[in-house]
Amino acid sequence: MNFQSSRMKVLGLAAAVVASSAVALSTVSSLAQEQDFRGQKIVQILQEPRHRTVHKDGNVYLLDVQINPGDTSFLHTHDAAIMYTFISNGDGPLYGRVSGNTDYVEQNFTHQVSNPGPGLFRIMALTNYGPGVEENNDRPQGVDGSADLENKWFRSYRVALAPGEETSIQTHQNSSVIIQTRPGKVHVSREDGVTAELSDMGDWAWREANAAFKISNPGNSSVEVVINEARR
C-alpha cells in the first residue's frame, strides 16, 4: 500500500487543556496530603494493581492505569518522574492530554485515586527512574516542530495525520512509545517493514532508542498520536 508522504504536523497542546489536567492532579494530591495514612496499607506505585506495568525498558516503566467506575486505588507512593497521557476519565474521552510531574524525584508522594464514573478512568503513564538528562543534544531526527512537553526525564510530541498521510522516517535517540489518542487506525512501521497496527485510543507501540520508524494513517478518518520519549 502506498501512502502519500507529507510533513509531520505537530500540534501544540492548548495551554488551558494542559492546565486543567495539572489542576486535576494537584487537587487530588493536595487532598491526599491532608490525610493521615498511619496504620493503612501503602504500596509503591509499581505494586499498585491498577497501575499495571505493560512494558519495562531498564529503569523505565510504561503503566496502563485503569480504574473502573466506583473503584479506588490502593494508597500508593510515587518515587520517580512520571508523564501522564490521559485517555479517559469517568466523564468520557480526554484524547491524550499530556502532563507530568518531576517533583516526586525530590519528594516522594503518597495518595490514592477514586473514579466516581460512570466511565473508565484510564491513563498511559511513563515512569522514569533515571537521573535525568542535563544536556540537550538528544533531539530526534526527522521530527518537525517543537515538543509539547520537555524536561530532564521526558519529551512528548503530538502528531495528526489525515487519511493516507504518513510522517517522515524519524529516529529518536531515546526509547519512545507511540500512543493512539483518537479513534481510527495507525501503522507504526520499522525500516525493515515490520509494522505494528494500532486501532483504538490507548493502543501503543514501543520503539527502542535509535530505531528508525514512520507513522502512517491507512484509514479513512483523521487520527492523532503522541510520541513520548524517556530521556536517559
Image: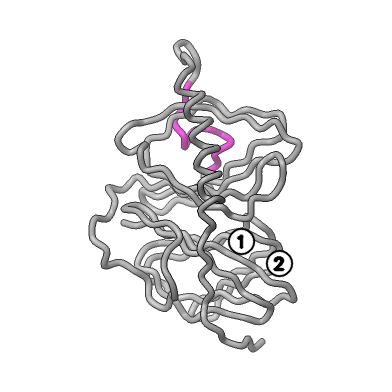
Disc 2 vs disc 1: Cβ atoms closer than 8 Å?
Answer: yes
Q: Residue 197's x, y, as percent? A: 64, 68
Depicted 65 relative to depicted 11: above or below: above
Residue for badge 2: 184
User: Which label belongs to residue 33?
Assistant: none
Graded by Cα atoms within 10 Å as few (under 14), some (14 to 19) or many (20 or more), the crowding at tag 1 reads many
Residue visible at 61% across and 88% down in the picture = 4
Q: Residue furthest left?
A: 135
Mark 2 and mark 1: Cα distance apart in space: 9 Å
Q: Is residue 223 magenta?
A: no
Above or below 164: residue 21: above
Q: Amino acid at mark 1?
A: Gln
Q: Quadrant of the C terminus?
A: bottom left
Q: How is the image coloured?
A: one colour
Q: Is residue 165 above or below residue 179?
A: below
Q: Does 57 sit left or right of 119 as displayed?
A: left
Magenta region: 42-52
Report crowding for label 2: few under 14, some 14 to 19, many 20 or more residues within 10 A (C-alpha): some
Label tally = 2
Judged from the image, the secondary structure of the residue bearing numbered disc 2 is loop
Task: Kindly identify which residue carries mark 1.
Answer: 180
x, y (%) of residue 88? 65, 47
Q: Quadrant of the N terminus?
A: bottom right
Name the amino acid, label 2: Gly
Residue 171 falls in which quadrant of the image?
A: bottom left
x 48%, y 75%: residue? 213
Residue drawn at point x = 58 percent, y = 64 percent? 225
- Label 1 sits on a secondary structure element that is strand
The location of residue 41, given as percent across then percent down, is 50, 18
